[in-house]
Image (cartoon, rainbow, N blue to C red):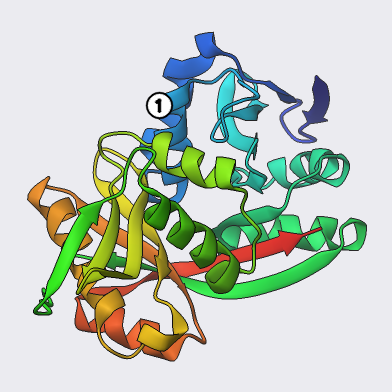
């Protein structure tokens, strides 16, 4: 537990800043915070809804959640997920040095979120971490969906353990598309530990798997899409665009809005998403650490 006391010089006011691990009894307060910041805290929302506040080490999407308080009010959340990601959010800049102090000591592989949140933290910790990648991305929302249909494509729901071909494709996608080594056990967990709302769609043509996309996370109003991948030999044929269009259709049928993040320099992907109706919402950062 960490406490800092700030005293105002003019009104002699005392503000107590505190960081502590959040617990299940804090859930209502946490949900109120997430409701105020729905789009930028989507990962936190879905993971807490599905897996709770307390950490369960065998669950990849559980985390240690640190709360930043100004007095009695929750003003920031710093999560360290078992799968290796750190996806912080705060409403007050006073959280930055306190969050950074914890981040310097904790191990994590990915730091991600809206640029305005992540960049100040990155600047504080970059001298203390070995940075492997720093990706300037854009966060897109879709309020004017324009569907794209490609003949001959069969869409498969891959949630659950899946067959060997699906698991093999997911492992290959992680390695070839995201430069990450995924064990077979983790690949199966990534398919099994999903809610009913978190579709994982495989696109198949002539009996061959040609693309994938999934709903990474959700809130009451949005579904965030990710894990897009098409094997190198199948690119440029519209398969990724078709699978993203299909997943968007399903999201909109639920009365929600599709969102996603994409690297700014990935011009073909940006062009394809624009054609589906996606527009820039905010800048986004994905930092990979050793």
Q: Is residue 3 visible?
A: yes
140 vs 208, nearest the viewer: 208
Q: What residue would you read off at disc 1?
A: 50
Question: Quarter of the image containing the C terminus?
Answer: bottom right
Q: Residue at x 28, y 47 (%)?
A: 199
Q: Residue at x 62, y 73 (%)?
A: 135
Q: Secondary structure at mark 1?
A: helix
**Percent of width and height locating residue 76:** 59, 36
**Percent of width and height locating residue 40:** 45, 50
Q: Residue furthest right?
A: 128
81 vs 231, nearest the viewer: 231
**Percent of width and height locating residue 4:** 82, 27
Query: In the image, is 190 to the left or to the right of 14?
Result: left
Q: Residue at x 79, y 39 (%)?
A: 98
Q: Look at the picture and state if 147 lies above or below 223.
A: below
Question: Quarter of the image containing the N terminus?
Answer: top right
130 vs 156, nearest the viewer: 156
Query: In the image, is 39 to the left or to the right of 102?
Result: left
**Percent of width and height locating residue 42:** 41, 44
């Amino acid at each position: 537990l960490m406490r800092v006391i700030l005293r105002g010089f003019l009104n002699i006011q005392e503000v107590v800043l505190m960081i502590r691990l959040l617990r299940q009894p804090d859930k209502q307060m946490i949900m109120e915070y997430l409701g105020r910041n729905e789009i930028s805290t989507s990962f936190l929302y879905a993971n807490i809804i599905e897996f709770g506040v307390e950490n369960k080490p065998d669950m990849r999407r559980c985390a240690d959640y640190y709360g930043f308080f100004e007095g009695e009010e929750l003003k920031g959340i710093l999560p360290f997920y078992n799968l290796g990601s750190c996806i912080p959010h705060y409403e007050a800049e006073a959280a930055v040095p306190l969050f950074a102090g914890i981040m310097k000591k904790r191990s994590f592989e990915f730091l991600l979120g809206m640029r305005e949140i992540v960049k100040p933290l990155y600047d504080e910790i970059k001298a203390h971490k070995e940075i492997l990648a720093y990706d300037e991305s854009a966060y897109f929302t879709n309020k004017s969906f324009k569907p794209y249909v490609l003949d001959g494509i069969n869409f498969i729901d891959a949630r659950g353990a899946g067959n060997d071909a699906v698991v093999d494709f997911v492992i290959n996608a992680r390695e070839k598309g995201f430069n990450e080594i995924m064990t077979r056990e983790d690949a199966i967990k990534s398919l099994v530990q999903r809610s009913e709302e978190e579709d994982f769609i495989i696109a198949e043509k002539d009996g061959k798997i040609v693309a994938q996309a999934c709903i990474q996370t959700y809130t009451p109003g949005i579904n965030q899409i990710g894990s897009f991948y098409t094997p190198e030999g199948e690119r440029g044929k519209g398969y990724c665009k078709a699978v993203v269009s299909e997943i968007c259709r399903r999201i909109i049928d639920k009365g929600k809005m599709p969102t996603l993040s994409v690297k700014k320099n990935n011009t073909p992907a940006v062009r394809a998403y624009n054609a589906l109706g996606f527009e820039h919402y905010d800048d986004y950062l994905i930092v990979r650490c050793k």
